[in-house]
Amino acid sequence: MLQTRVIPCLLLKNESLVKTIKFKKYSYIGDPVNTVRIFNEIEVDELMFLDIFASKEDRDINFRILQDIANECFMPLSYGGNIKSFDDAKRIFEIGFEKIVVNSNAFKNLDLIEKISSYFGAQSIIGSVDVGKDFFGQKHIYSHHGTKRQKYDILEWVKRLQAVGVGEIILTSIEKDGTWSGYDIQTLKEVVENTNVPIIANGGCGKIEDIRDVVKLAGVSACAVGSMVVYQKKDMGVLINFPNKNILEKILK
């Protein structure tokens, strides 16, 4: 297992995998269960699945596809997408997922996070924060797949999530998503320096050097990767893959 976690972050739309660019344009990637089989063979350490339209469209969680994924998967799993209740979380854990990821519904009900964390443990819940820019270039938090701007300052919201018991936070740059241009190191560094929970960087990874840079310059605990593990290269076709672990270990020393 890598000392710094590198987590394929896979996006669900209905029962298919897709990949977005800046949370807007999305392209079909493939079948999630077949993709899991490939990652089993590659022996990645963990997988994250996010249903990117569940909260935006207020759709029910597709427990059937989650069960199919869990039945096939050999590594720890996390899931996010319109988790509204304690019972939703309980059922996801019973299916076989180790962690849940909460984003949009946290703004409606922070008490839910506290209840889940108290019962299942902080290690079972990841707070998700999506950061985007307004017309003037100012950074704000957005929910519902980037369609609703929230009133909270980034650090204020991160501290609120920490206070109610999340075990870690995944911070996603909307502007960087799917661009292969590297992580938002500045924002990630600021968040790392002002919180006590592990931070997962997400959005923008295009090469293993991006992972090295965000770990060393921002101090994040883990990196989520999307485009880089579902495409051959930028502007090329689909190819499920994962960076060479020996090379990753070497550059992360």
Image (cartoon, rainbow, N blue to C red):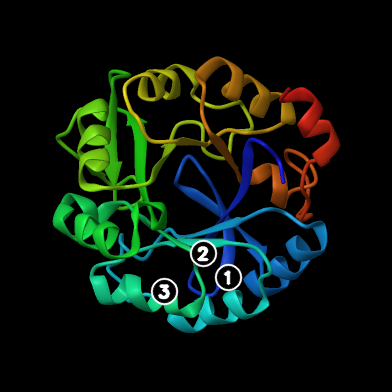
Query: Residue 12 bears which disc, if any?
Result: 2
Mark nearer the viewer, 1 or 3: 3
Alpha carbon of mark 1 to alpha carbon of mark 2: how far?
6 Å
Badge 3 is on which residue? 92
Amino acid type shown at disc 1? Ser
- Write the residue at 76% across / 56% down: 240
Question: Does residue 122 sit above or below 84 in this rendering?
Answer: above
Asked which secondary structure carries label 2, the reply is strand
Residue 57: give x, y in percent of width and height: 30, 66
Q: Nearer the viewer, residue 242 or 71?
A: 71
Q: Are marks 1 and 2 in contact (CB under 8 Å)?
A: yes
Q: Give the image quarter of residue 131.
A: top left
- Write the residue at 52% across / 22% down: 219
- Is residue 31 toward the left or the right of residue 81 in the image? right
Alpha carbon of mark 1 to alpha carbon of mark 3: how far?
19 Å
Query: Residue 16 bears which disc, if any?
Result: 1
Alpha carbon of mark 3 to alpha carbon of mark 2: how far?
15 Å
Asked which secondary structure carries label 1, the reply is strand
